[in-house]
């Protein structure tokens, strides 16, 4: 298995060192950058060749929210996993729709952090029980809202099939094989849906689809 290069941004040095130490047994994970705030992270991120960033939210200067948005614009290939103490669902919605690939609380076990890193690398997003509970809560709330035809999101059958398969963790090649279309067509449909819904990456697309009940 190829080594995954990781950066961590957190203004608490003891916490940073603790995360690094707790993940040391997983030899396929390599920490290549530590930063105390978003500005320092962005200045050094390109040279670090990091593939995944573990991102705190509250940091002096440039916080994790601003930094996540900046990474999605400047380094869209880099995956961002939020690692924070904030359980407020507003943070989850905002960050997952603006470039984050996953959202973890700081009480997460090392095994879950490792799993999240591998999943964002393999499929582009990680949704844990914490995020799924928020999505379920949102789904129940939507069920009690009177439908509005003017705001209804209408998808073609092909768009819905592609979106459903993305949410079921299939790759573009696997979706293309299932649907009898080319991988390029799958990617084009995915890109069109992301642009239409205003999402930054696959994680945001999946989050939007589940939150808005676009798949069965």
Image (cartoon, grey):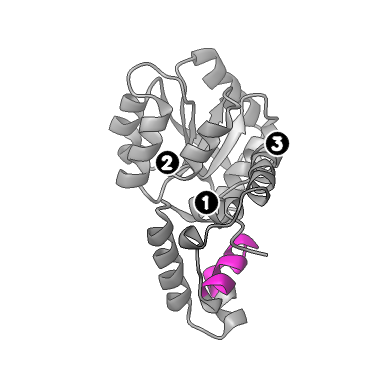
Of all residues, the one furthest to the bottom in this rendering is: 180
Q: Where residue 185 sits: x, y (%)?
A: 44, 77
Q: Which residue in the protein does label 3 denote?
A: 111
Question: Is residue 43 in view from this perspective?
Answer: yes
Secondary element at tag 3 = helix
Q: Report, in whole angstroms, how far the alpha carbon at label 3 lies from the one at label 1.
A: 21 Å
Neighbor class of circle 2 (other Cα within 10 Å; few <14, some 14-19, many 20+) is: many
Secondary element at tag 2 = loop
Look at 57% across and 24% down and name the residue there. Answer: 86
Q: Please indicate whether residue 22 sits to the left or right of residue 183 in the image.
A: right
Look at 31% across and 26% down and name the residue there. Answer: 39
The prevailing secondary structure element of the residues shown in magenta is: helix
Q: Nearer the viewer, residue 142 or 68?
A: 142
Secondary element at tag 1 = helix
Tell which circle, 3 or 1, labels the residue nearer the N-terminal end.
3
Question: Is residue 26 in view from this perspective?
Answer: no
Residue 111: quarter of image: top right
Is 117 colored magenta in this rendering?
Answer: no
Q: Please indicate whether residue 17 sits to the left or right of residue 190 in the image.
A: right
Q: Which residue in the protein does label 2 denote?
A: 50
Q: Where residue 176 sits: x, y (%)?
A: 54, 78
Q: Where residue 23 sits: x, y (%)?
A: 63, 31
Look at 62% across and 25% down and name the residue there. Answer: 106
Tell which circle, 2 or 3, labels the residue nearer the N-terminal end.
2
Q: Which residue in the protein does label 1 denote?
A: 203
Q: Quadrant of the C terminus?
A: bottom right
Neighbor class of circle 1 (other Cα within 10 Å; few <14, some 14-19, many 20+) is: many
Residue 195: quarter of image: bottom left
Closest to the camera, between mark 2 and mark 1, is 1
Q: Tell me which segment is drawn in magenta.
A: 159-173
């Amino acid at each position: 298995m190829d080594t995954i290069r990781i950066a961590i941004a957190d203004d608490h040095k003891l916490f940073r060192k603790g995360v690094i130490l707790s993940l040391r047994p997983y030899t396929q994970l390599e920490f290549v950058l530590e930063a105390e705030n978003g500005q320092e992270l962005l200045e050094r991120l390109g040279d670090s060749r990091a593939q995944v960033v573990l991102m705190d939210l509250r940091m002096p200067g440039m916080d994790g929210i601003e930094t996540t948005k900046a990474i999605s614009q400047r380094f869209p290939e880099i995956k961002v996993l939020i690692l924070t103490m904030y359980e407020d669902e507003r943070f989850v919605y905002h960050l997952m729709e603006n470039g984050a690939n996953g959202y973890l609380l700081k009480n997460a076990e090392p095994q879950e952090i490792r799993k999240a890193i591998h999943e964002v690398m393999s499929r582009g997003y990680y949704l844990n029980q914490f995020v799924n509970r928020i999505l379920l809560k949102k789904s129940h709330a939507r069920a009690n809202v009177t439908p509005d035809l003017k705001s209804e999101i209408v998808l073609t059958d092909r768009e819905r099939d592609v979106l459903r398969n993305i949410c079921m963790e299939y790759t573009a090649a696997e979706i293309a094989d299932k649907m009898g279309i080319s991988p390029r067509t799958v990617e084009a449909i995915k890109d069109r849906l992301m642009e239409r819904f205003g999402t930054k990456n696959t994680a945001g697309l999946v989050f939007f689809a589940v939150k808005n009940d676009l798949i069965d």
